[in-house]
Image (spheres, rainbow, N blue to C red):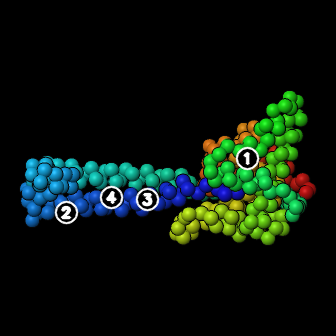
Amino acid sequence: MTINLGGFADGLSKIGKNLMETATFYGASKMALHNPSTGMYGPSVWTQGCYGGGYMGGGYMGGMYSPYNNAAIGMAYQNGYASTMAAIQSAIAGSQPVADLPDTDAPAASAVDANQDTMAGAAFEVSEKTGQNFDFAKTSLESITDAAQKQAKYNELTQQLAKSLLMNIDKNSGNSDGYLALDEFLNNELKNSNLSEEQKTLLRTKLQQAYSQLDQNGDSKVDWKELTAMITGLYDTNNDGEITAEEFQAGGNNLLSGSGASALRTAYQNLFGNREQS
């Protein structure tokens, strides 16, 4: 899969950007409005140059005795502080500690066949990256009226998607052994991103935590059953066979933040139990 990392990375970037803007604006305001060499005739940071440096562009609004001095500096500080704190809170929202659930004792599922069709998996990745709705079962389920049959068909199609997704990643970023190792997962998520190296370093930790959630039994490889649980537990949470753009975003955020750990575990146990053999 290609988790949408943009929101998390943007939050980190905005923190630095807003801190810089606040410092620059504060410094410029203080220098322009409190420079003793300019006195009442110093330029205003709001209207420098307007009307040839006269009433609006010169001393009154920008002068050292102007009542707007402290107001301007206070405004710069408050605006910068508010936007910076908003960016920090946004980044923190995607950086909560991962829930430390014990590993299951479930054996690994069988390896995905090397000849597994990867079209559905590739379509999943494209839809997640571009924010498009992805119908992997909804249309197929519309004609089925019996609830048990519909659930069985949904499970079948979800497992097919999980196998296709796993092998698509394994062929493009791994060794095609039918399992997804940590380095293959990281390579797939980061290789085509437009993130800086600093951002990649920060996000690599979050991705490692995400992988540890996917690896339900802690055997250092993600199998198709574990990806099936990811699809039903984090992405298609209403189990209607279609993943919307909003569900893609929420699923990726929950996986990165660790807030989806319990949902993943519940989905895995509902689908396969703890001890089911592959």
Label located before the other in sequence (3 or 2): 3
Inspect the image, locate mark 4, and give the three-letter code of the amino acid beneath it. Answer: Thr
Residues under labels 2 and 4: Cα distance?
14 Å
Label number found at residue 22: 4
In front: label 1 or label 2: 2
Image quarter hosting the N terminus = bottom right
**Mark before the other along the chain sequence, 4 or 3:** 3
User: In the image, what residue occupies the spot 8% across and 56% down?
Assistant: 40
Q: Position of residue 248 (x, y in %)?
A: 65, 47
Instruction: Measure the C-alpha gap from mark 3 to mark 2.
Output: 24 Å
- Disc 1 target residue: 233
Q: Amino acid at mark 2?
A: Met
Q: Which residue is mark 3?
A: 15
x 62%, y 64%: residue? 192
Task: Answer whether labels 4 and 3 touch (C-beta < 8 Å).
Answer: no
Where residue 259 appears, as percent x and y from the top left, is 63, 51
Q: Is residue 136 left or right of residue 31?
A: right
Quote the CA–CA distance across marks 4 and 3.
11 Å
- Helix, strand or loop status at disc 4: helix
> Is 187 or 108 nearer to us in this picture?
187
Q: Earlier in the sequence, mark 1 or mark 2?
A: 2
**Between 214 and 117, the one nearer to me in the picture:** 117
Q: Looking at the rendered structure, which numbered label has been put on residue 31?
A: 2
